[in-house]
Amino acid sequence: MPQYVAAIDQGTTSTRCIVFDRQGQIVSLAQKEHKQIYPQPGWVEHDPEEIWRNTLEVIALARIKGKLSVQDIAAVGITNQRETTVVWNRKTGKPYYNAIVWQDMRTADLVIEFSGDGHGQDRFRSKTGLPLATYFSGLKLKWLLDNVPNLREDAERGEAIFGNMDTFVVWNLTGGPAHGGSSEGLHLTDVTNASRTQLMNLQTLDWDDSLLSDFTVPRAMLPQIRPSSEVYGTVSSEVLPGVPIAGILGDQQAALVGQTCYEPGQAKNTYGTGCFLLMNTGTEIRTSTCGLLTTVAYQFQNEPAHYALEGSVAITGALVQWLRDNLGIIKKSTDIEALARSVDDNGGAYFVPAFSGLYAPHWKADARGIIAGLTRFVTKGHLARAVLEATAYQTVDVVRAMETDAGVSLKSLRVDGGMVVNSLLMQFQADVLNGPVICPRMTETTALGAAYAAGLAVGYWQNLDDLRQNWGIARTYEPDMDDTQRKKLMHGWQKAIERSFGWED
């Protein structure tokens, strides 16, 4: 048996390849950022061909850094930014248009149109677990079909094919004319990514004909839906020739798997570009009444699907990047903690980062970002603190909604993602949540979850107990704030967030 498992983590801001050993430790890592494209306000795009080139590069770099041969790799798993939508030609491999990113808001008018005539935002929730929102792939795909010349005709003929980024990466890794392949690549996705399109029925785990009719999406352009862990095929690209592709998970579901949350009631929160809290609900499909999503958590081969409740927050880490790139208040993202620590509190300032509207639990597409509570006293240190606090407040809103939906209180919160290295944020999170926040030894849980899915499929790990043994605690943050202060801060947050509603006509 080869010694390692590789994971390709195709994220919102970068693509990475991480190689893990049997204990879930990192052997080698390579990462490359890609360009964020903003054609007009509210629109967010990526260049799929740039991402594919970066994917090849990071795989090669990870092998070089780790001095790894192909024979060292037992399997490769893939995890990806969900909902980001790309359509390409199956003969040429060329995209018809840039990838439309999950944060993109160009379909806001379609949300209004589909919600009209008394249908409401929950028109498709019973089948898909999702409200109508600009977030999901289905409306993005409809926009492409309606606006890109000749695309619908090619789609009807089966020449134009669709996928989230997992599908695009797999197709290119397993063939595809885009890099000189002699045959087409595999056109498939897994149940977790399919559940984010608003085109899949949660009960049947297949594309739903009535949904396809409502969205006017030709079935011929859709990928095959497969479990999250099984051998789909082998890599034909020269970067990992012959290595099985054996796991696919949307990034947030991958983090749930990487955090070994395999029992109903276990939950994790990932702090990345956005913030995503998932609670495993087992094989039960639990419909939310509090603004959360119902989604597929994972499906391992020959087993029933497990489901999850999810609270999705659009802007968290991206707000730190905005402070860096748009305002120039900090030079590096990591500078924000020292700047925030230069003051004792937020000085009365609150930052609501509704750049893409508000997701869970509010689902307000008309909300926009605001800074509230400013006085002459407020400095850039207070703004930095308000930026970090916004992530914690939004998480509390999602946790409270999830506790109501699930009928249980979270005893602790397992956390992961790039922002967990910020100890000021993690302590404040424990304070306003009034509960322990647990950081695992391995914070790269998204890539680790994809590696776990792939490794299970090829027998590198035998069972879930093997994976549970790899999980351990690096640090636990206990709450250290009195109730009066906590209530005062949350009251200020609620006032601020309500003022962001209805900004966009």
Image: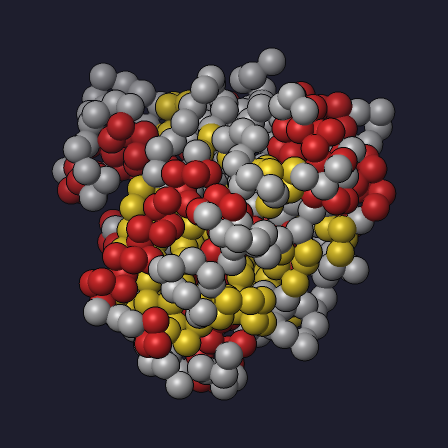
Report x, y in % for residue 63.
27, 64
- The residue located at (38%, 64%) in the rendering is 240
Check the picture and name the quadrant holding the C terminus.
Answer: top right
Is the image coloured rainbow, by chain, by secondary structure, or in one colour? secondary structure
Vertical relation: 28 (above or below) 216: below
- The residue located at (32%, 67%) in the rendering is 19
- Which of the 4 image quadrants contains residue 232? bottom right
Vertical relation: 502 (above or below) 397: above
Between 25 and 256, the residue placed more toward the observer is 25
Between 476 and 71, the residue placed more toward the observer is 71
Report x, y in % for residue 45.
47, 30
Q: Residue furthest top?
A: 505
Question: Is 103 left, or right, of 120 in this rendering?
Answer: left
- Which of the 4 image quadrants contains residue 29? bottom left
Report x, y in % for residue 75.
44, 72
Check the picture and name the quadrant holding the N terminus.
Answer: bottom left
Question: Is 127 left, or right, of 192 in this rendering?
Answer: right
- The residue located at (41%, 65%) in the rendering is 241
